[in-house]
Image (cartoon, rainbow, N blue to C red):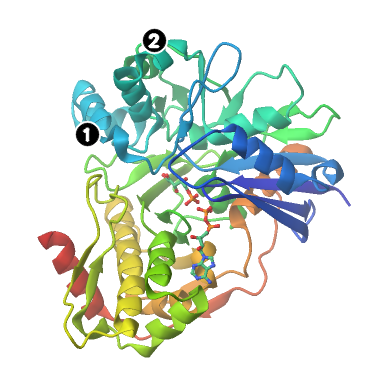
């Protein structure tokens, strides 16, 4: 039995899953935390990788890394970071994104060129911020990598040139997603000079070897990894509630949404991954639990004690600024608070806000692709909450499929590793057992109240 290792180097932690290459059965998994914040020394991810994969990596015949998208890992000529990496949820580059869009000829021209309209999250926006605010650091940049590229090179044999895949490359802002090619001119325009960029490895190909000869696959962005881990097919919508909130679907053809609501990324199989991403997701619940002085289980119990609509309390949860809609300077807004408002109402409103923002994402995907979702699947750390599982079908207004608890980005990376190991034309078939169907009476009034606040503020 060959074993493969899939790694998810995501915002809050590294998760490593050792899997049977034949059928995807999980043999063992481990994790290690990342530092908090929206700028992080990328070497901390290498330490977390080493901690999470200790005792697992040496048992694997092949390995691949999925990683948080967009983060700017800017390296000098010696391969050392010129500064901390700026992450996807760091909004200081919002004005830089606007400037780049204008230089590219406006939002639709930008979407036509790279598949998406730039926001602060994209790597190119961060490079422009660096050029304008830290010119000495910008001048020292010799190479720009994404988080997963940086971790992949760490595990490859010394001297291996950096590599990436079209999925993660499509979130940089200097990759022509439809054509599958770098746009070094756009990287140069952002940074002020042309940096070295990693080689783009084809789906399913071997990218490198470890020092002991294990196969290393290209790896990909975490959302592309989740799509591969769940074998997402056209008509499926994946809703993920981690640090970010994501609604994604796979498509055989590229999109170019000039409104910027739906980003037109590439996936890890040679297709595309239309996607809507929010910056405020599981963190809404973390904050609410802290404010109410409870843990996550108690927060869920409180929320389920209140009625739908939380007695008129509504939350617009843009605490850290927001990206969809593009309101980087926004803050959170509570409405409808009265002397009769209870702690249960406050808890309920937090869950409803989180789920309404994701329901907006599912609707936007529908508008951009024209495809009515056939299946909606729910994954991510916050699905551990019983209130998320209970309220999701009500707020989304449809049945929701809940795969067994698992690390689906890491599973997707493992599946990519198994694919590269096999040399086959397609990824291996890995059955997904025991998916649960969540149903509830739709609660359209909750969405109406949320939409009113969203459009008013
Ligand atoms: N029982 C729970 N209820 C609500 N949120 C939870 C629960 N367990 C974990 N989480 C949240 O899930 C988030 C981590 O999810 P995860 O998908 O691993 O994030 P990421 O991949 O972005 O690092 C954390 O914010 C954590 O607080
Ligand atoms: O920026 C995006 C997608 O465009 C985020 O989805 C990041 O990829 C971070 O993902 P998580 O750590 O929340 O999984």
Left or right side of 22 for 272: left
How many neighbours does mark 1 have within 10 angstroms: few (below 14), some (14-19), or many (20 or more)? some
Counting from the top left corner in percent of width and height, residue 236 is at 46, 60
Along the line of sight, the residue nearer the viewer: 99 or 200? 99
Label 1 element class: helix
Residue 333 bears which disc, if any?
none
Q: Circle 1 sits on which residue?
A: 108
86 left or right, relative to 331: right
Establish if 80 lies above or below 63: above
Check disc 2 and report the residue beneath it: 193
Q: Quadrant of residue 122?
A: top left
Residue 390 visible in image: yes
Q: Is residue 376 above or below residue 9?
A: below
Residue 422 visible in the current orientation: no
* Lower sequence index among marks 1 and 2: 1
State the image quarter where residue 299 is shown: bottom left
Q: Nearer the viewer, mark 1 or mark 2?
A: 2
Residue closest to the eye, 46 or 179: 46
Residue shown at 30%/68% (left/top)?
A: 353
The residue at the point 51 percent across, 32 percent down is 166
């Amino acid at each position: 039995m060959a074993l493969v290792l899939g790694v998810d180097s995501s915002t809050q932690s590294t998760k490593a899953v050792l899997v049977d290459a034949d059928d995807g059965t999980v043999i063992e998994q481990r994790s290690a935390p990342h530092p908090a914040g929206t700028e992080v020394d990328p070497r901390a991810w290498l330490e977390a990788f080493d901690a999470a994969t200790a005792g697992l990596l040496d048992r694997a015949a092949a390995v691949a890394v999925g990683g948080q998208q967009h983060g700017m890992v800017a390296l000098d000529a010696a391969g050392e970071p010129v500064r901390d990496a700026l992450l996807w949820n760091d909004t200081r580059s919002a004005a830089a994104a606007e400037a780049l869009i204008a230089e590219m000829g406006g939002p639709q021209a930008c979407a036509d060129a790279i598949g998406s309209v730039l926001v602060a999250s994209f790597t190119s926006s961060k490079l422009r911020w660096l050029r304008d605010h830290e010119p000495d650091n910008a001048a020292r940049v010799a190479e720009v990598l994404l988080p997963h590229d940086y971790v992949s090179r760490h595990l490859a044999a010394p001297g291996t040139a950096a590599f990436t895949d079209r999925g993660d490359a499509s979130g940089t802002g200097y990759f022509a997603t439809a054509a599958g090619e770098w746009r070094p001119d756009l990287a140069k325009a952002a940074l002020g000079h042309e940096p070295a960029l990693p080689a783009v490895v084809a789906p399913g190909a071997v990218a490198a070897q470890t020092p002991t000869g294990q196969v290393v696959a290209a790896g990909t962005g975490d959302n592309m990894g989740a799509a591969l881990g769940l074998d997402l097919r056209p008509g499926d919508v994946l809703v993920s509630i981690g640090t970010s909130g994501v609604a994604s679907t796979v498509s055989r053809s590229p999109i170019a949404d000039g409104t910027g609501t739906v980003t037109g990324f590439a996936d890890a199989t040679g297709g595309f991954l239309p996607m809507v991403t929010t910056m405020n997701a599981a963190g809404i619940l973390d904050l609410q639990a802290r404010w109410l002085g409870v843990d996550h289980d108690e927060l869920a119990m409180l929320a389920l004690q209140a009625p739908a609509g939380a007695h008129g309390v509504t939350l617009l949860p843009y605490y850290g600024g927001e990206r969809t809609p593009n309101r980087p300077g926004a803050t959170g807004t509570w409405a409808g608070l009265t002397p009769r408002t209870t702690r249960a109402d406050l808890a309920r409103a937090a869950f409803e806000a989180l789920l309404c923002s994701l329901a907006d994402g599912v609707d936007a995907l529908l508008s951009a692709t024209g495809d009515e979702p056939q299946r909606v699947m729910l994954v991510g750390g916050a699905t551990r909450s019983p209130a998320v599982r209970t309220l999701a079908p009500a707020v989304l207004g449809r049945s929701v499929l809940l795969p067994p608890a698992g690390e689906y980005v890491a599973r997707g990376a493992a599946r990519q590793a198994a694919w590269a190991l096999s040399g086959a034309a397609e990824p291996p078939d890995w059955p997904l057992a025991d998916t649960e169907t969540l149903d509830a009476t739709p609660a359209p009034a909750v969405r109406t109240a949320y939409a009113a606040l969203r459009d008013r503020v």
